[in-house]
Image (spheres, rainbow, N blue to C red):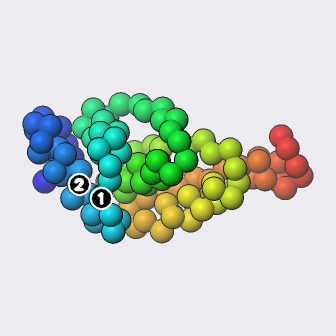
């Protein structure tokens, strides 16, 4: 069943489908809050600004959307180049996701800060 078909389903069906989507890409289950945010993005198809603590699992949320929602646009603001590069590598490895990676080096041609 597609995400569009589940947009009018009840919350329990959406939770089950979201759990199955997570299991396709990850060897672990998402916590309740992660599942709630993913459901919001999948089914409400609205914007989300997420500021969460370290180790919350934000990566899973931002990686699932471009994989499962065709033509989705995900803008991720990450302040550290090392984390950005790690996320770019993970997302570019997902067969359905398309990635445009922009950081300070890209914007300045490697000449320092913009």
Q: In this figure, which residue is indicated by the disc labeled 1?
A: 29
Q: Which residue is located at x 53 percent, y 56 percent?
A: 99
Work out whether 76 lies above or below 94.
Answer: above
User: 99 or 59, which is in the foreground?
Assistant: 59
Q: Which residue is located at x 26 percent, y 57 percent?
A: 21
Quick check: 92 left or right of 42? right
Secondary structure beneath dot 2 equals helix
Residue 47 picture quarter: top left
Residue 33 picture quarter: top left
Q: Is residue 39 visible?
A: yes
Q: Is residue 69 visible?
A: no
Disc 2: CA contacts within 10 A as few (<14), some (14-19) or many (>=20): some
User: 76 or 50, which is in the foreground?
Assistant: 50
**Total numbered circles:** 2
User: 111 or 18, which is in the foreground?
Assistant: 18
Q: Quadrant of the N terminus?
A: bottom left
**Of callouts 1 and 2, the N-terminal one:** 2
* Discs 1, 2 touching: Cβ within 8 Å: yes
Q: Quadrant of the C terminus?
A: top right
Q: Which residue is located at x 27 percent, y 63 percent?
A: 23
Q: Position of residue 13 (x, y in %)?
A: 11, 45
Q: Position of residue 16 (x, y in %)?
A: 16, 51
Q: In this figure, which residue is indicated by the disc labeled 2?
A: 19
Q: Position of residue 29 (x, y in %)?
A: 29, 58
For the residues labelled 1 and 2, the Cα–Cα distance comes to 7 Å
Secondary structure beneath dot 1 equals loop
Q: Which residue is located at x 56 percent, y 58 percent?
A: 87
């Amino acid at each position: 069943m597609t995400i569009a078909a589940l947009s009018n389903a009840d919350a329990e069906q959406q939770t089950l489908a979201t759990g199955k989507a997570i299991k396709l890409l990850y060897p672990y289950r998402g916590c309740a809050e992660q599942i709630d945010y993913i459901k919001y993005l999948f089914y409400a198809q609205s914007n989300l600004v997420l500021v969460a603590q370290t180790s919350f699992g934000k990566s899973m949320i931002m990686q699932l959307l471009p994989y499962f929602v065709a033509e989705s646009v995900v803008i991720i603001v990450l302040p550290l180049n090392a984390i950005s590069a790690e996320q770019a590598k993970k997302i570019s490895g997902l067969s359905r996701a398309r990635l445009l990676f922009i950081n300070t080096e890209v914007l300045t041609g490697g000449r320092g800060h913009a």
